[in-house]
Image: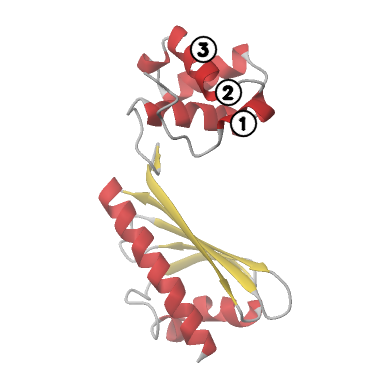
């Protein structure tokens, strides 16, 4: 495979700076090790045993290799697909958190407001089971200064790539509605 034609999400220079090797070098190493026939865990174990790169880079090198060879789809994880969306909102964090926490406020801006909150940390995060009862929703809140909040939604355990893409669109629209709701 001509890895120069593969478009990695992390630049060739960045991977070389952080790991000492660029993408073509990593692909050559993994090809020689037979990684196309290895599981994700086996590739990571190979990197752990033979190369001193941090845990995060072990995962990035492995996932990039798997995606380049069609062994893994974009957003695919061992337990399904995972997507995330984020938005900066010009509203204090307390109001943004409340808009997610209270079912009455959710019902005014979400088509599917009845998710089940499993755990929450005031003005920091919500962990929920989505309305389908099968997928997970993690919502994180970051205070970015006076009346400015970043909201990040991560939806995981989605069954396939089509559902993942649909939920990316869903959450982008939902975050825009949240912004409008809080401004109104």
Inter-mark Cα distance, 3 to 2: 11 Å
Residue 106 relative to residue 122: left or right = left
Picture quadrant of residue 51: top right
Picture residue at 39% right of the left edge, 20% below the top: 2
- Identify the residue position indicated by label 2 in the image: 22
Q: Is residue 100 above or below residue 52?
A: below
- Identify the residue position indicated by label 3 in the image: 29
Residue 76: x %, y % from top left: 38, 40
Q: Is residue 33 above or below residue 13?
A: above
Mark found first going from the N terminus, 1 or 2: 1
Q: Give residue 13's mark.
A: 1
Q: Name the residue furthest right.
A: 145
Residue 105 relative to residue 13: left or right = left
Residue 62: x %, y % from top left: 49, 26
The reply to whether discs 1 and 2 touch (Cβ–Cβ < 8 Å) is yes
SS class, disc 3: helix
Picture residue at 63% right of the left edge, 26% below the top: 16
Picture quadrant of residue 68: top left
Mark 1 residue crowding within 10 angstroms, few (<14) / some (14–19) / many (20+)? few
**Which mark is in front, 1 or 3?**
1
Picture residue at 52% right of the left edge, 24% below the top: 23
Pick whichever, 168 or 96, lies toward us.
Answer: 168
Mark 2 residue crowding within 10 angstroms, few (<14) / some (14–19) / many (20+)? some
SS class, disc 2: loop
SS class, disc 1: helix
- Quadrant (top left/top right/bottom left/bottom right) for the N terminus: top left
Residue 174 relative to residue 96: left or right = left
Picture residue at 63% right of the left edge, 72% below the top: 149
Inter-mark Cα distance, 1 to 2: 7 Å
């Amino acid at each position: 495979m001509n890895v120069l034609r593969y478009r990695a999400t992390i630049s060739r220079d960045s991977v070389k700076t952080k790991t000492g090797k660029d993408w073509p070098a990593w692909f050559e190493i993994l090809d020689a090790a037979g990684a196309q026939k290895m599981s994700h865990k086996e590739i990571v174990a190979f990197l752990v045993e033979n190369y001193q790169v941090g845990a995060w880079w072990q995962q990035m090198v492995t996932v990039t290799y798997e995606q380049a060879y069609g062994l893994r789809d974009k957003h695919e994880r061992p337990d399904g697909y995972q997507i995330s969306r984020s938005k900066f909102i010009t509203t204090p964090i307390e109001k943004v958190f409340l808009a997610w926490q209270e079912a009455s406020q959710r019902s005014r801006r979400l088509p599917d407001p009845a998710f089940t909150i499993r755990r929450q940390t005031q003005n920091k995060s919500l962990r929920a089971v989505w309305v389908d009862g099968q997928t997970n929703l993690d919502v994180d809140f970051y205070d970015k200064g006076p009346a400015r909040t970043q909201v990040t939604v991560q939806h995981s355990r989605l069954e396939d790539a089509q559902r993942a893409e649909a939920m990316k669109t869903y959450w982008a629209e939902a975050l825009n509605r949240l912004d409008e709701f809080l401004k109104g």
